[in-house]
Amino acid sequence: MSGSFNSASFTTDVPNRLDRLPWSRFHWLVVVALGVTWVLDGLEVTLVGSLAGAIRESPRLQLTETQVGLTASAYLLGAVSGALFFGWLTDRLGRKKLFTLTVLVYLVATIATGFSWDFWSFAVFRFFTGAGIGGEYSAVNSAIQELIPARRRGTTDLAVNGTFWGGAAAGAASSLVLLDPAVIDPELGWRLAFGVGGALSLSVLLLRRFIPESPRWLMTHGRNAEAEKIVGDIEEWVAREKGPLPPVTGSPIRIDPRSHTTLGEVARTLFRTYPQRAVLGIVLMACQAFCYNAVFFTYALVLTRFYGISSAHIGWFMLPFALGNLAGPLLLGHFFDTIGRRIMITATYGLAGVLMAVTGYAFAQGWLSAWEQTAAWTVIFFFASAAASAAYLTVGESFPLEMRAMGIALFYAFGTLVGGVVGPALFGVLIEGGQRTDIMWGYLLGAALMLIAAGTEWKLGFAAEGKSLEDVARPLSQAAE
């Protein structure tokens, strides 16, 4: 059964008007107010990574290495659940309502984490923190892609996703202070660290008041007058800064509006209309999720167990790692709009996979010091970070507007469930075993998955650079010509 229709069809040039706008302060506002999601996620992941030793040594929690890995998996399970539930709501109720609700869920849960008293309370609070972040990915990715001009979509999306590592750097830096016994009791310090994200999210709520609902979402839901007004307001804002706007190019599209899209339509679109894109999205998301989460969630445990690094100094090793990850999408992002998606995604996944295999072998042989190991990961994830960001870009562009949030949620959920939940738990067990060769096999598995993803992109990748979202994937509500 198709989504129910809610008004008569109409013709609109809303997408063309948005895509022809020059870059302006409005677009910077969108990037900052919505893109902070990745900063928050990076902050959360790095805090737990940097604080893993202190949390494990906490006299109240008394967690084993396996339990630390399991709490990372709890966060990711929450992200999966949040992405699916809030992604479904985002396509039905709109982008703006949901990116406000999800940041509130995150705010409450991350502060509550600081009050954990045992393994189960810590795991539950991490689950709901992840739920807020997972919901953010669906709502925010949709809104950003629908508001950013087509010619800058790849560069912007990679840069925004890359800011995860700005949050990671902030988390690493804050851990250096909050875990320093000379400054504060580490038992109190790791608890206070979870308040950093809560404080940042309060400012996010203020900024998001100025972000409008996506005109593209309004358009497909029969609210064309509202869509036209919002686009007009954006054009006035941009024109005041940039002067006369370029003429609108391209043909208008005719919309048969609908109130919602059913799960049956989502399934048919994924596996009948775009089966190759569905396979590509699954592979890209799952492979990068395993690689990233397996390494990053447990790196602090590797440093403490195999290199003898104290918990208070973990942040010094996380900081360059995070900065290398941040640099990748920022420096490579524009090539995804110029050289093209297929070549760049294949290259970044492939390079990351080869370098990870070499580094995993070197680790097993004991050839690397703690700093050399960190330098190797920094280089590897310079490329892997751009690859992972491109995976989110790909799944957002691949499918029609009416199911964009749900599509992002489904692929994020599947990739995270397969790659992200299994990875940290597996590596937690391997690290607890205490054998370098066991961990090497985990690294080689991650390398193999990245190479598989590179080959899949080369085979199934498609050109989306510079194209309108409606040209990449025809809206379900677009009337037949």
Image: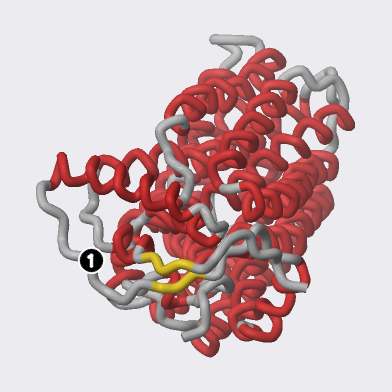
Left or right: where 56 falls relative to 120:
left
| Residue depicted at 84% across the width and 18% down the height | 60
Left or right: where 190 falls relative to 379:
right
- Counting from the top left corner in percent of width and height, residue 359 is at 55, 64
Which residue was labeled with disc 1? Answer: 248
* Residue most extreme to the bottom: 459
Mark 1, secondary structure of its residue: loop
Count of residue discs: 1
Residue 139 can be seen, yes or no: yes
Left or right: where 17 falls relative to 41:
left
Q: How is the image coloured?
A: secondary structure
**What's the residue type where badge 1 is placed?**
Val
- Counting from the top left corner in percent of width and height, residue 26 is at 30, 42
- Whether 99 is drawn above or below 381: the answer is above
Left or right: where 201 falls relative to 91:
left
* Residue most extreme to the left: 243
- Counting from the top left corner in percent of width and height, residue 184 is at 60, 10
| Residue depicted at 24% across the width and 40% down the height | 237
Residue 394 can be seen, yes or no: no
- Whether 467 is drawn above or below 379: the answer is below
- Whether 329 is drawn above or below 167: the answer is below
User: Camera-side residue: 449 or 128?
Assistant: 128
Q: 10 Å neighbourhood of mark 1: few (<14), some, or many (≥20)?
A: some
| Residue depicted at 48% across the width and 29% down the height | 204
What quarter of the picture does the N terminus occupy? bottom right
- Counting from the top left corner in percent of width and height, residue 205 is at 51, 27
Q: State the image quarter where residue 181 is shown.
A: top right
| Residue depicted at 53% across the width and 89% down the height | 459
Q: State the image quarter where residue 270 is shown.
A: bottom right
